[in-house]
Amino acid sequence: MDLGMIGLGRMGANMTERLMRGGHRVVGYDRAAESVQRVVGKGAVGADSLASLVGQLPAPRAIWLMVPSGDPVDATIDALIPMLSPGDTIIDGGNSNYKDGMRRALMLKERSIDFVDAGTSGGIWGINEGYSLMVGGDDAVIDRLRPIFETLAPAADRGWGHVGPCGSGHFVKMIHNGIEYGMMQAYAEGFSIMKHKKEFGIDLHQVAELWRHGSVVRSWLLDLTALALEGDADLHEVEPFVADSGEGRWTVAEAIDLDVPAPVITLSLLERIRSRDTESFADRMLAVMREQFGGHAVKREEAQQ
């Protein structure tokens, strides 16, 4: 099956290569010419513009977007619309907000262009392990694109699923990422407690490895934790700054809108935000309040010379 891939960053390029391994013909485009050349070197067909990509695909066309969420997705879709024909399909495989997906689906439906939102998980390992795909869209469209999903997934009969109408794919991926936040935070806190128990001299890498087999907390995240600790168990070269893609925030907002308590996911998001506060004005306030009511000592920074 022919497919257009727009956005050839690390994940888009890996997905392109996996599709080609599965016998699909992929036409790739990226604003960075060197990214196009990399996938061409692996057997993809290169395009130097959106028009070139569209022109090299047979109808009905299927075009997969792996571009940053928000305005870049809208801008890419707006640029594609005049070039597409009724029956063509745009697949958004990035981390878009599900509400944006629902809006885009309605807009494209008015032009008889199909839209699919494919929540995609697997990161840099998906090229060999396969991707988990949470797919939203119309039944007939998903069925037509089934060979693509079956190739990208770990196996044709597992790791991917049609979860509902347009918007549902990114909604499920959003919840997936919220759960991921909580799991990562729990691992991080547990290993931190063990590291601070100095008198036991616990080898964190050893613990991660033994938990990987038979333990009720074993998981792929734990496998990756063990891999990270193998080379530097103290993580000396890593700054304590944790970014977020936005999906954790959307999950928390959705939980509030639905009156669903989600304390673990919410607190894990707040911990990520806290990690970026190098000034920590709130902690400074706590210290001076303790000083005021109880005369507790406050550590003060030395005056700048």
Image (cartoon, grey):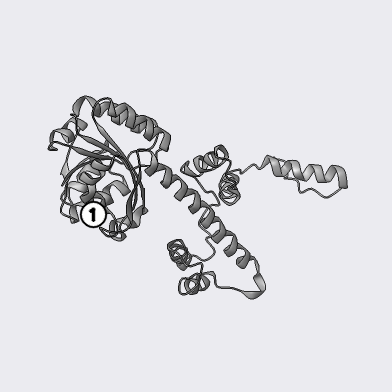
303 or 177, nearer to the observer: 177
Mark 1 nearby-residue class (10 Å; few <14, some 14–19, many ≥20): many
Return the x and y of residue 289 as percentages of the image width and height. Answer: 80, 42
Residue at disc 1, secondary structure: helix
Q: Residue at x 70, y 41 (%)?
A: 282
Q: Is residue 173 above or below residue 186?
A: above
Q: Which residue: 39% across, 42% down? A: 168
Relative to the observer, which residue lies in front, 263 or 278?
Answer: 263
Residue 156: quadrant of the picture: bottom left
Quarter that holds the C terminus? top right
| Residue 82 on image: x %, y % | 21, 24
**Residue picked out by circle 1:** 151
Q: In this figure, what is the number of numbered marks?
A: 1
As shown in the figure, which amino acid type bears the numbered disc 1?
Thr
Residue in the picture at 19% in, 33% down: 87
Which residue sits at x=17%, y=41%?
46
Examine the rendered structure and indicate whether residue 200 appears above or below residue 191: below
**Location of residue 65 in the rendering, given as x and y in whole percent from the top left corner:** 29, 39
Residue that sits furthest to the front in the current view: 139
Front-most of residues 121 and 235: 121
160 displayed left or right of 304: left
Q: Is residue 185 left or right of residue 111?
A: right
* Viewer-proximal residue among 208 and 230: 208
Q: Residue furthest right?
A: 294
